Amino acid sequence: MHDVATIAIKGDAKSNSDGVLLINSLHKSFGSNHVLIDFNLKLEGGEQVAVLGKSGSGKSVLIKCIIGLLVPDEGVINVLGHDIESLNSYELDQVRTKVGFLFQSNALYDSMTVRENLEFPLRRHSIKLTPSERYNKVIAVLQNVGLAHTVDMMPAELSGGMRKRIALARTLILEPEIILYDEPTTGLDPITGKEISRLIKTIGEKYNTSALIISHDMECIRMTSDRIIMLIDGKCYAQGTYEELKKSNDEKVKQFFE
Amino acid sequence: MSLPPIWRQFLYETGEISRFTGRFFSQGFKPRYEITELLRQCFIIGYKSLPLIGLTGFIMGLVLTMQIRPSLISYGAESQLPAMVGIAIVREIGPVITALIFAGKIGSSIGAELGSMKVTEQIDAMEVSGTNPFKYLVVTRVMASTLMLPVLVILGNAISLYGSYLGVNIRGVTSFDLFFKQVFDALSFKDFVPAFIKSYFFGFAVGMVGCFKGF
């Protein structure tokens, strides 16, 4: 078993400037349900790390804590040198411009066109661009995901895979340094899932972004991640590359590869 | 002594909606103001409700007139029909029926829309995009419904009185000018003001409950 405790981050996460994302002793409970127990993680610049775990194991809770949508009970989350819990709402918004979040359900705004969906983060984060610059930026990110022709379409007119790509384009529009992917291939057929996985890999290489990929899709994890962290019973149970973990004799690790 | 579960649930809901209302007043009047979204919601909540409110008001005025007419004829008081219908519609029936229709259409649509946005993580996405979802979604909708219901009540009353005018003319002949002169002669300023003011409270309550259930 590759116990993640061997790489546990010691001391104040703030003082460690190597990683773009540092999580130290994170605890999160909902009533008597302890979802995350002493969770530690370090994400290096340009690294793509997958967090693998069963449904309900707390993967989504983890990334919602990272982005500040949930408040942890204990522990330190340090994103790009900022302790998330100590930030006021303005500072948190500033950090969020550098962290992209691809939601499991895409979270495209139903009442807006694709263009309006993509322009929304630019407008709301008060990024000063002229209308033509904003439009060009929208078209550029749509071209990156191969869907420039959908600019004036409504989300309801798009297929599941297209919606996922548009959501990914919206994530990219602020040129984030870290991207958090919450189950990016859930609900997609295997072929579209592979396309999305390839796109995630390409984006990581092209923009040199760090990524935390939450998934239980082994093919997606194999294609996209440099390192895998296994989240079992709220703890970092094991970590390693795909090949290392595949060779593991631990029963809990093996069941993911069967 | 512990309270029965139904009472506990009632008190819990009352506490939660009070807290939600408090949050509206604490956040609703501070910048950043979502003026564009407020205007969009006024269009959706106000303008798009007008056909339903107008149709209901028209039928209400027409039917009320046709049902009251035989009774008034038997007392020899047919000439009082416009005044009677006018007072009934402007003082009470207009605001209450309009608010009920408004609650059914707008209250439920706000609840369903926000509930759907919550389930599909659109509210979380909004927060990640540097937007306070409470201000953007809740404050704008509650304000729009508070501002639009009085306008709809006025328009609904006008359409209802027109329906009444047509109802009078089905069996008799009364000119448009005479009908409305009789209506307005019977009404005074104090008939309009309470009805107008209470429709603001109805609008606020509809918006608030819809948002509370959905958000």
Image (tube, coloured by chain):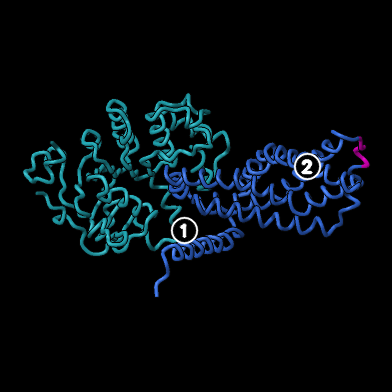
Chain colours: A cyan, B blue
Amino acid of disc 1: Ser
- Nearer to the camera, A33 or B163: B163
**Quadrant location of the N terminus of chain B?**
bottom left
State the SS at label 2.
Answer: helix
Q: Which mark is residue B67?
A: 2
Q: Is residue B180 left or right of residue A65?
A: right
Residue positioned most to the left:
A249
Numbered circles on residues, count:
2
Between A184 and A159, the one lying in front of the other is A159
In the picture provided, is B73 more to the left or to the right than A190?
right
The span from disc 2 to disc 1 (Cα, nearest Å) is: 60 Å
Which residue was labeled with disc 1? A89
Q: Position of residue A214 (x, y in %)?
A: 28, 43
x then y, percent, for residue B134? 52, 54
Q: Which mark is residue B83?
A: none
Question: Is residue B176 one of those drawn in magenta?
Answer: yes
**Residue B166: image location, x then y, percent:** 83, 35
Q: Is residue B11 above or below residue A39?
A: below
Q: Residue A183: image x %, image y %?
A: 31, 40
The amino acid marked with disc number 2 is: Gln
What chain is tagged by disc 2? B
Residue A173 in view, yes or no: yes
What segment is highlighted magenta in the picture? B173-178
Query: What residue is shown at x 42% (from left), y 66% (from top)?
Result: B4
- Other-residue count near label 2 (Cα within 10 Å), few / some / many at <14 / 14–19 / ≥20: few
Q: Residue at x 86, y 46 (%)?
A: B72
